Amino acid sequence: MRMLAYILRKEFKQIFRDRLILVFMTVAPLGQLLILPLATDYEVRNVHVAVVDHDHSVQSRALIDEIAHTSSFKLVQYASSMKQIMLAIEDNNVDVGIDIPVGFGKGLGNGVPQTVFMAVNAINGMKANVGAAYLTSVINDFGVETAITMHPELRQQAGLSVESMSLFNPHMDYRAYMVPGILALLLTMIAVYLTALNIVREKEIGTIEQINVTPIKKLQFIAGKLIPFWLMGMLLFVMGLILIRVFYNIQPVGSTTLLIGFAATYLVAVLGLGLLISTIAETQQQAMFISFFFMLIFVLLSGLLTPISSMPEWAQVVTRFTPIRYFIEVMRMVVLKGSTLYDVRFHLLAVVGFALFFNGMALMLYRKTSR
Amino acid sequence: MTSAAIYVENLFKRFGKFTAVDSISFDVQRGEIFGFLGANGAGKTTAMRILCGLLAPTSGKAVVAGYDVSTQVEQVKRNIGYMSQKFSLYEDLTVFENITFYGGIYGLTTNQLAEQRSELIERLSLQSETHSLVRSLPLGWKQKLAFSVAMLHHPQIVFLDEPTGGVDPVTRRNFWDMIYDAADRGTTIFVTTHYMDEAEYCNRVSIMVDGRIAALGRPRDLKTNAGVATMDEVFYQLAREAKRGAE
C-alpha cells in the first residue's frame, strides 16, 4: 500500500505538471462537448426551395405562401423556368424545385386533380428524402384544405389520418439524443489515449526499465497508473453531466447515480484497453496508431451516429464487441427513458466482462522480465 | 560460489537466430569493482540485463546476491541497484521528488527516506537545486544523481551501464570517486564502459567479443599477457578479432 501511495503521488505530480496534457484532458473535451453537438445535427431544416409559377393564380400564390411559411423550408428563388432551377440545383443552391403548371388554380377550383412537378437534389440523400416527403405532405394538405374550403360538404367524408407521438423525446430534440453519446465518446478517447501513451512514454524514455528493476509488484505499478486516470475520467464525466444540464438543459430522467456508477465501471474497461495497447506498443507512434484504429471502429460502430438496428447483420455482431456501444446505449436509456439498474443489467454485465478481459490480458502481457 | 556476489555459469541468450550471449562463465567477488568491457554489440548490455532480472536467459545459470535470476528474480531485484544506459530519472520531477519516489518504491521507511534524502543532497551539493526539475540539471549532475538514487536502498551490488557516457573528464573523475566510495562501503560494482582509463580503475575486467568473454583478469595481468603497455591496446587486439559488426 505504501508503495502504491508513492506511485500515485508521482503520477499526480506528473499529470498536474504537464499543463498541456491537463488542459487536453479536462477543458478541451468539455469545450468539444459544447460545440460538437451543434455540428452533428441531423434535423432537416433550411431546405432550399425554388418555384416556377406558370399559373400566377390566387391558388398558386397561396401554395407558395404556405411553403414559404413552413419553418423547415426556405424559399430561395422565384425562377422563370424549370431549366433555371435545374441549373441552381447543379450549383447546389437549391434542394427542391417545384413547377406549378398553367391552369393549376382554375383546375383546383373545378375540382380537377392537379399535378405539381417536383425536382429533388439527391446529393444529400437524407435532406432530399425528408425534405421531399415533407414538401409532398405540405402540398397534399394544401390540396385537401383548398378542396374543403370550396366544397365544405367534403369535410363530412372523414379521411384516415395518422397521428404520431414521440415517446421519451417528445420534442424530437436531436441534442438530447446526441449529447449523452458524445460525452461517452469523449470519455472513451481520453481514457484510452492517455493510458496508452503515458505508459509507452515511460518505455520510450527508459524509466519503465528502472521501475522493472525495483521490487515493485506489477499490480502496484498498473494500479498506480490506472487510479489517477480513473479519477480524472470520473471528474470529467461528472463535469460533463453538469455542463449538459446547464447548457443543453438535459436532465437525466433516470438516476444520475446509476449513470456515474456505470461510467465508473466502464472507465475501468477502457483504461484496461489503453493498458493493453501500451503492453503491445513500443513507441508512442505505435500506440497512437493502434488506439486510432480502435477509436475509428468505436466511433462508427458505437451507434453514436447511425442506429445499430439499421446496420447490416455482420456489423451488428461487431458492435457487440465494442464496449462503447453499451455505454452510449445506457447513457441514452437512462437520460431519455429513465431506465433503471435492472433495465441495464446486461449492459453492465458486458462492461464488467470487458473490464476483466482487457485488464486481465494486460496484466498477463505486462512483464517485468522480458523474454 | 556462495561467497561470490555474482556467479555466472554457461549463461546463454539467443534472440531468434542471433546469439547475443554465448555461454559465458565468470564470477565477481563481494566488494569488487568489476569492469565489463566490449565493443558495441558484443553482448554486454544483454548480459547485464539478464543479471538484473530484466531479461530471462535462454539457458545457463546466474546467481546474483545469492539468488538465482531465473527463479528468484524478485529477491535479486531487492538486492541490486541499476543505472541504465538511458537516463532513468523523471525529468519532469524535481530532485526531491525523484529521490522520494525511488526510495519509496524500494520500501524505505519515512524516516530512512528523509535521512537518506538529505544526506544524498548534501553529498552531491544539490542543496540549491533540491526543488529544481531534474531536466534543468547538467548531464554530469544528472548522472551522479542517478547513481545515488540507484544506491538509495543500500544494494549489495550495483550495475552501471556506461554511466559516464558523454560526460566531461572532470565529472568522470568525480563519478569514479563516488564508485570507489561505494566499493569501500562494501558494495560490489559491476560497470560497463568504453573508456579504457576507467578500465584501469577496476579490480578486474572482462572483455567480451562476439558474445563470449575473450579475456578476464586484473588490468595489469591482461596487459602483461598481451605484451602491451595500455588497456587500449589490449582491447584493440581482442576487439579486432570480432566477426560481428556493431549493432
Image (cartoon, coloured by chain):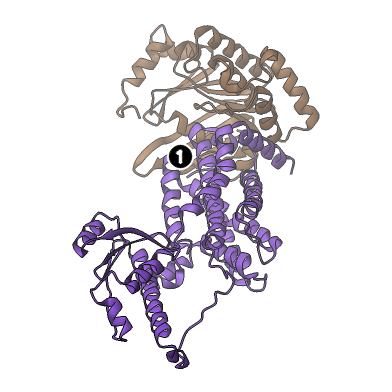
Instruction: Point out residue B126 in the picture as x, y percentages from the top left corner.
Output: 67, 14
Residue A114 visible in rendering: no
- Please tell me how many numbered marks the rendered image carries: 1
- Residue at 47%, 43% in the rendered image: B59
Instruction: Point out residue A35 in the picture as x, y percentages from the top left corner.
Output: 51, 48
Q: Nearer the viewer, residue B48 or A250?
A: A250
Instruction: Point out residue A60 in the picture as x, y percentages from the top left corner.
Output: 32, 71
Left-right relation of B91 to B128: left
Q: Nearer the viewer, residue B197 or A44?
A: A44
Q: Which chain is purple?
A: A
B76 w.r.t. B163: above or below: below
Residue labelled with disc 1: A284
- Residue at 68%, 63% in the rendered image: A258
Secondary structure of the residue carrying tag 1 is: helix
Chain B, hue in figure: brown
A285 w.r.t. A33: above or below: above
Q: Nearer the viewer, residue A190 or A176?
A: A176
A138 w.r.t. B56: above or below: below
Displayed quadrant of residue A198? top right
Displayed quadrant of residue A52? bottom left
Seen from this angle, which residue lies furthest left? A83
Left-right relation of B58 to B29: left
- Residue at 62%, 59% in the rendered image: A250
Q: Chain of mark 1?
A: A
- Residue at 31%, 27% in the rendered image: B245
Residue A64 visible in rendering: yes
Say what amino acid the circle numbered 1 marks.
Answer: Gln
